[in-house]
Image (cartoon, rainbow, N blue to C red):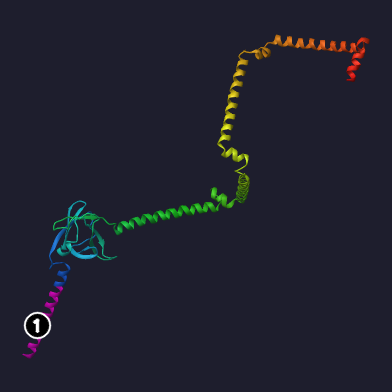
Amino acid sequence: MAKSTSQKIKVGIFVVVGTTLLIAALYFIGKQQHMFSKTIKLYANFENVKGLQIGNNVRYSGINVGTVSKIEMKEVGRITIEMLVEEKTAVFIKKDAIAAIASDGLVGSMVVNVSPGKSQIDVGSVVSGDTIQSHRNIGTDEMLATLNITNENVASLSFDLLKITEQVLEGKGTIGALLNDTTMAQDIQKSILELRKTTETASTAMARVNNIIAKINYDESAAAVILSDTAVANQIRDVFENLEKSSEEIHSYINEIKSGKGAINHITQDENLVREIDSTMIYIKQAADKLDQNMEALKHNILFKRYFKKQDKK
């Protein structure tokens, strides 16, 4: 009888402890699932839920504020998730909030992250039944696919770079010729030296010009007068204008001569007149020679001999 009583006590203690643990577990799980707090329902639409399951957490700014209560595919490319969010935290979620599905750590379960919107105006808090915006994050598979493409491109680029390097080492192409052709390298070196000499010569010439300019007395020299005196500048301008007018007049005279007007054209163009002038000059020369002979004869004449001696003495 005593043994039966002790067994009953042990069974009673086990039942009480088990019931207590079960109630505590149910309370803890219900609290985590927000079963004992007032909640509102929010919705969001996605093309791909990426393994999201019912019961996964909903976070707002990194804080657990609810759970996923329902996942339903409405149509192709549109999956609607229903979220139970605590009413006391829902007042901080605005209507322009954005929902996104992300992984809870590297190997954790999926969660729904709700982030505040970027609207500058107050759009009000969400109410039960509202559908908030969704944002599609890049998944791990997509990142791996992109990384795979990147690796293939890097491999192809490395192969091409290896081929180019081999061709350069073999002396092919312009770069290979530059690296392997010593004659071309010497020519380039000579060209650089000549360019350096030219630069030095130009620098020396500029220094000389600057020295000449520095030696100009801008207060007393003629250069200063030409450069700074407006009256002299005007006079020089007048001189050039007069020269231009004179050149125009000379050009006009030349045109008149070419057109047959004036005595100069008559003299230069009339061949008969030129021959007559030549004949006249010949006659004048002959008359002058005869006059010289006559004068010489007079000097020896007895009547004029004394007169010429007096002229010679004078």
- Neighbor class of circle 1 (other Cα within 10 Å; few <14, some 14-19, many 20+) is few
Q: Is residue 33 above or below residue 187?
A: below
In the rendered image, the quadrant that contains the N terminus is: bottom left
* Image quadrant where residue 11 sits: bottom left
Give the total of numbered labels: 1
Q: Position of residue 172 (x, y in %)?
A: 54, 49
As drawn, is 84 to the left or to the right of 195?
A: left
Name the residue that disc number 1 marks. 12
The residue under the point 22% across, 65% down is 63
Which residue occupies 92% across, 9% down?
303
Q: Residue at x 14, y 61 (%)?
A: 40
Q: Is residue 298 visible?
A: yes
| Principal secondary structure, stretch drawn in magenta | helix
In which quadrant will I find the C terminus? Answer: top right
Start-end of magenta stretch: 1-25
Residue 296: percent from the left, percent from the top?
89, 13
The answer to whether residue 91 is left or right of residue 257 is left
